[in-house]
Image (cartoon, rainbow, N blue to C red):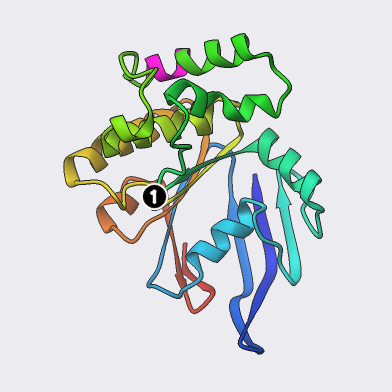
Amino acid sequence: MIRLRQLDKTYRTGGRPLHVLKSLDLDIEAGEAVAIMGSSGSGKSTLLNVLGLLDGYDAGAYHLDGRLVRDLDEPTAARLRNELLGFVFQSFHLLPDKDAVENVALPLFYRGLGRAERNRRAAALLERLGLGDRLDHRPSELSGGQKQRVAIARALVTEPRVILADEPTGALDTQTSAEIMDVLGEVHRAGMTLVLVTHEPEIGARADRVIRLRDGRVVGA
């Protein structure tokens, strides 16, 4: 599903190069649940941004679902993201002026679905995730765990091939974190490929495999 070969990524900060990912090789199979771990500055978030087509790379090759991903213009990147990828973020990234159904339905707008069908699919997914009584609630009316469930529903509504989760439990207490990981575990068992960045060993231990980064390189997988 994901294949990286000799991938390099460098940023320029203050006119000086910062080599973040260094000749990185990585394979993630379809249906696998992988945790990416490493200390701050190891390249975890940069790697996730590259995998999510939110950032490009300088050298090497990235194949996603058998397609070479390189030098994409934004419309093409946006189309592939909408077709193949779902995102879950630590800070939820929900729209504050939209209720739960509207937040979840948003990706379907870019698929060209009518409003009634978008909302029907979003409501059904929220029901499955235990939020049937929160459909018309805005983010300010939801707990942290409820917001993350809405974010997971939004990631799932387009039926992507891969879920990319960036510290999905980082803003949650221990019990809520376990509940969210249970939800993600159900998603994985249903056949979804799951890639999550975490600094918490107990979260990483729930994945099929842990990929460890250090200074932009894979040091364990």
- State the image coordinates of residue 28 (x, y, percent, origin top left): 57, 50
Q: Secondary structure at mark 1?
A: loop
- Could you say which is closer to the camera, residue 92 or residue 130? 92
Q: Residue at x 61, y 30 (%)?
A: 107
Position of residue 143 relative to residue 45, above or below, is above
Residue 40 is inside the magenta segment: no
Left or right: 125, with 51 as reference point: left
- Mark 1 lies on residue: 90
Q: Is residue 83 visible?
A: yes
- Could you say which is closer to the camera, residue 155 or residue 98? 98
Left or right: 46, with 16 as reference point: left
Position of residue 94 relative to residue 46, above or below, is above
Magenta region: 124-128
Left or right: 210, with 51 as reference point: left
Residue 125 is inside the magenta segment: yes
Amino acid, disc 1? Gln
